[in-house]
Amino acid sequence: MTSRQPVAHFDLPSRTPKRWRGLPRWLGALALVAMAAFAGHHLAMQNGLARLRDAADHRLDMLATGLDADLARFEYLPALLEMTPIVPALLGTPSDMPLRDAVNRYLDGVNATAGAEMLYVLDAAGTSLAASDWDRPGTTVGQDLSFRPYVIDALGSGRGRFYGVGITSRKPGYYLSYALRRDQPTRGVVAVKVNLEEAERAWRKLPGDVVLIDQRGVVILATREDLKFRPMLPLDGLQRAEVQRSRPYGEAGLRPLQWAQKEVLARDVQVIALDGVDQLASTRKLRGAPWQLVVLDDLAPLRVDARNAAITASLAMAVLLLMAVTLWQRRRAVRQKLANQAALQLAHDTLESTVVARTAQLHAAQGELVHAGKMAALGQMSAGVVHELNQPLTAMRTLSESAAILLDKNRLDDVRGNLQRIRGMVDRLARLTSQLKTFAHKSELPLAAVPVARAVADAQVIVAEATKKNGVAIEVDVQPATLSVMAEEAALGSVLVNLVRNAIDAMQDSPSPHRTLRLEARPQEGRVILRVSDTGPGIPPHILPRLFEPFVSSKPAGTGLGLGLAISAQLARAMDGTLRAANLPDGGACFVVDLPAAVEAILIPTPTGVINK
């Protein structure tokens, strides 16, 4: 026990510091990344706010100048009307209807030149005597407007200004009023209504939102309809009484805005929350009216940019730290490289001796594998040769027997046709044997235009005896009749004969008395689709995925080697085509050969029909 106490005493303290040794470095790295992110966010926010403030100042200068100009361009109208004899004459004799009509027409002409929305004259009691819109609905002629602030101010101090909704027109506008007092006391008032909706529509073309706030803190113009005629703060009792008396906002409900000040950046610049959205509000007072023009800029895009800047700064700091760590790791790797070289040399020497022993074993196994591969290739080639030669020989026997019968019947033309078919079979055998001479070399089949109908007819002749013996009816549908494919004639014939024979063999076990073999061919987008379908039991599901593999067959043992479909698929690929198989929904199997169409098989529509090109 005493011999183990020193080990426990020295091991435990040495393990505890290793666990926390890297913690200060990680905390320092995280602190540097956080500082970089904070600095990037702060700088991006400050620069973005400066850009927004500069742009807002420019817009405020432009908007305030334009609005002051719109309000001041009608200052000359009172003096003009006061110097016109018929206006003072009407104030002296308001019941003179011809004189009133003349004043109406005069005001209409002056207003057409001045460009105001409406120009009218009121008597000392505040009743409208004549107006430029006397002949239009909603005219002020005959209306008592003595309660309106701009009339009261003009009668009291000689001049009045007022923004509000018209009593008769129900349209908002800015009213300017001037007392006509050439002869004391005041005999009447000239009022001008200015339409500011054009200016409001022009504001909508600028970035951000613009609002115009009157002396009560109510928004009277805005680029957003949901902000108009809404106070920034709830109105007190005196303000509500004044609004009720002068009706400047028509029937508006005066629902207060959700306007909250969050931060003051300068005297006329602050961050506010409007309907829960942070905005930068820049304010400018107008010279010609007791109003404030406010430009609102959404801070969400600026904060997104600041967040992106913070992420970029933090990533840059992380990259710098990783580079520093990489350099430190490289220095460690150089130190460890020399130590690892000795271990690698030892492992190399051990592997050398192992490789020498394994190489001797592999050389012995390689000879046995080569011999086995040669025997397998020889067996597969022999089976393929027997399969390919058996079909033409069977057809030649059938044709020769048929020729003998026809010769007995003195049908010489038919005998000559059979002999020509036998000669074609001999040519095919010659081509097959010539292909066997170059079996060891990879080559492409010579492709030429082969009529599909002729290839199908040749295949029918070869399988005629098997068809008759098994009671199979063959249906051929080649459309158009001149349809041709780019193929090697012998290879195409081998594929068709093999597919037809397989279909006949499959229908031997079919319980249905109607055994039908159907061959169809159709052009499709520069290709020819040839289908061979039967009414047999179909392909077993467990064989269908491996149908085109060598030595895979659904036939009973001893009746097939499973090479026919594998050879057919290889021949189809050699002719730039494909061969695939599937089971039909109503029973039976369908094999589809996809080959390139010959040039003469391309159909060209004409006004009188279809021709071949």
Image (spheres, rainbow, N blue to C red):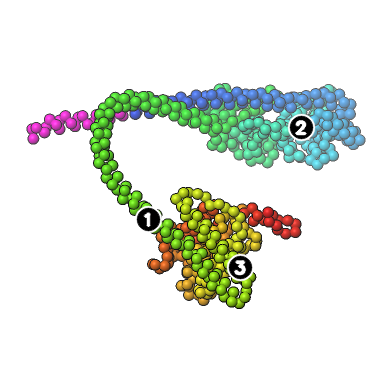
Quarter of the image for the C terminus: give it.
Answer: bottom right
Q: Which mark is residue 210?
A: none
Which is nearer the N-term, disc 3 or disc 1?
A: 1
Residue type at the position of mark 2: Lys
Q: Nearer the viewer, residue 433 or 15?
A: 433
Q: Considering only vertical position in the picture, is 99 above or below 444?
A: above
Residue name at image x 41 percent, y 25 percent: 320
Q: Circle 1 sits on which residue?
A: 376
Dot 2 corresponds to which residue? Answer: 193
Question: Where residue 559 appears, x then y in whole percent?
Answer: 42, 67
Question: Quadrant location of residue 255?
Answer: top right
Across and down, in percent, residue 26 comes to 34, 29
In this picture, residue 34 sits left or right of residue 582: left
Location of residue 413 (image quadrant): bottom right
Residue bearing the label numbered 3: 417
Of 451 and 102, which appears nearest the observer?
451
Q: Secondary structure at mark 3?
A: helix
The crowd level at tag 1 (other Cα within 10 Å; few <14, some 14-19, many 20+) is few
The question of residue 444 being in magenta is answered with no
Question: For the residue carrying disc 3, how many other residues have a C-alpha within 10 Å: few (<14), some (14-19), or many (20+)?
Answer: few
Residue 382 seen: yes
Q: Is residue 13 magenta?
A: yes
Mark 2 vs mark 1, CA separation in Å: 108 Å
Q: Is disc 2 placed on a helix, strand or loop?
A: strand
Residue sitting nearer the eye, 177 or 236: 177
Q: Is residue 558 above or below residue 486?
A: below
Q: Position of residue 233 (x, y in %)?
A: 58, 34
The residue under label 3 is which amino acid type? Gly
Report the mark closest to the observer, 3 or 1: 3
Image: magenta residue range: 1-25
**Separation of residues labelled 3 and 1 (CA atoms):** 42 Å
